[in-house]
Image (cartoon, rainbow, N blue to C red):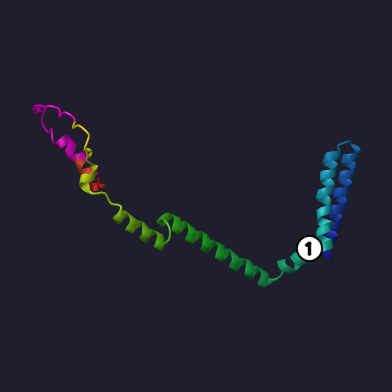
Amino acid sequence: MIAETVCSAVSAAGLGIAAVTAYRRRFLTAARIAAYSLVPIGLVMTGVVEWLADTAFSPVAWAGFGVLGVAWVLFMTTRAVERRRGGTRKERKEARAAARRDAVAPGASAPSLGAGARPAAEPAPRPAKASRGGDDDFSDIEAILKKHGI
């Protein structure tokens, strides 16, 4: 009963403000204010306000909102974990199987020559430099490449 009275008063006040705004020749703004001020009385007339008042004071309704909140938190948590892992268990299993099937042989990175292709002239081997650790410069790079399977 109080909610209906408050909504009616808010609508009446809004229509009064809209009338003053229209008197000042700001018709577009006055029409918008009138539209907003008619919403509370429309909600009262349709019974939405009474339903909301009954719901707001019902412990069962609040428990229901709590259950919905817990369900939403669980859903979002599982989605975040699934994204972090990279999909469902079935998708991860299929990805591992595909990686094994599509693995490239170690010698496949060397270019193959076709039947009609001429082999390129090999450059003359350079004399070994007397610098210390000549092979050590590339050993770190080779270790990294082997670690990544390249």
User: Which image quadrant for residue 73?
Assistant: bottom right
- Rendered location of residue 130, percent (x, y): 8, 27
Residue drawn 76% across the image and 67% down it:
51
Q: In front: 89, or 107? A: 107
The residue singled out by tag 1 in the image is: 49
Residue 76 placement, left or right of 115: right
Residue drawn 20% across the image and 41% down it:
142
Residue drawn 78% across the image and 63% down it:
48
- Rendered location of residue 44, percent (x, y): 82, 61
Report if residue 132 lies within the magenta region: yes
Residue 72 placement, left or right of 11: left
Which quadrant, please, contains the N terminus? bottom right
User: Which image quadrant for residue 96?
Assistant: bottom left
Which quadrant, please, contains the C terminus? top left
Q: Given the image, on which type of amino acid does mark 1 rest?
A: Val
Residue 109 placement, left or right of 74: left
Dominant secondary-structure state across the stretch colored magenta: loop
- Rendered location of residue 38, percent (x, y): 84, 53
Report if residue 55 lies within the magenta region: no
Look at the image and give the residue range highlighted in magenta: 120-141
What is the crowding at mark 1: few (fewer than 14 residues within 10 Å), some, or many (at least 20)? some
Residue 117 placement, left or right of 9: left
